[in-house]
Image (spheres, grey):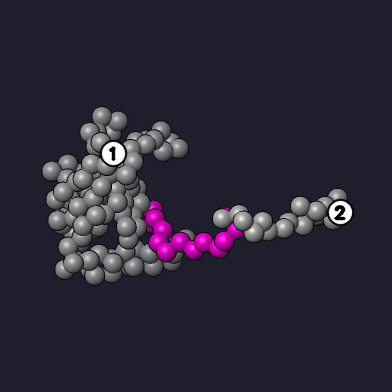
Amino acid sequence: MEIISDDSIELEEIPSDSESEQVTRKSYRLPVKHKKQFFLKIDERCFPLVDISDSGICIEVQADTEFPQDAILKGCELILGDRSFDNLEGEIVHMSVDGDGNWISGIKWTLIDQQIHPDLEEMLAHLRREFFENV
């Protein structure tokens, strides 16, 4: 780093720095606004969605929810408003506390029925459009 004047600096890229390579996210998590209409149902228990992406979801849980990390959840049903996507399988990737002190759990999809996959992608595209129109 070389100081040019009191008010500015010039930054030089470090060639061996792996973070200096341009990284573009292929997908991102979309925050969920209508938590009563968007949830995950597992064994008759409902968990409100915090956010959703093509590869998984984040749900609200209670501190005593028994989801061990790396557990595989089978027979999940994802409810997105008036649409329902069932027979999903996901892996618990984390149980943590968010910035507001609420317990959350991240789930990465490991199995999505190929017949519903296009419908789920279409619904996510619709939610993205709706989200960015209202920002």
Q: Give the amino acid type for the residue marked by disc 1 in the picture.
A: Gln
Q: Is residue 98 left or right of residue 19?
A: left
Residues tagged 2 and 1 counted as in contact (Cβ below 8 A): no
Where is residue 114 drawn, in percent x and y? 18, 67
Assess whether residue 28 is covered by the magenta stretch. Answer: yes
- Which residue is labeled 1 in the image? 69
Q: Which quarter of the figure has residue 47?
A: top left
Residue at the spot 49% in from the left edge and 63% down from the top edge: 24
Tag 1 secondary structure: loop
Q: Give the amino acid type for the residue marked by disc 2 in the picture.
A: Ser
Q: Nearer the viewer, residue 34 or 69?
A: 69
Where is residue 85 drawn, in percent x and y? 18, 59
Tag 2 secondary structure: loop
Q: Which quarter of the figure has residue 98?
A: top left
- Which residue is labeled 2 in the image? 5
**Which residues, given as a range, are shown in magenta?**
19-33
Assess whether residue 29 is covered by the magenta stretch. Answer: yes
Seen as rendered, the residue at the extreme front is: 16
Seen as rendered, the residue at the extreme right is: 5
Q: Is residue 69 left or right of residue 96?
A: left
Earlier-in-chain disc, 2 versus 1: 2
Say if residue 81 shows up in the picture: yes
Q: Which quarter of the figure has residue 65?
A: top left
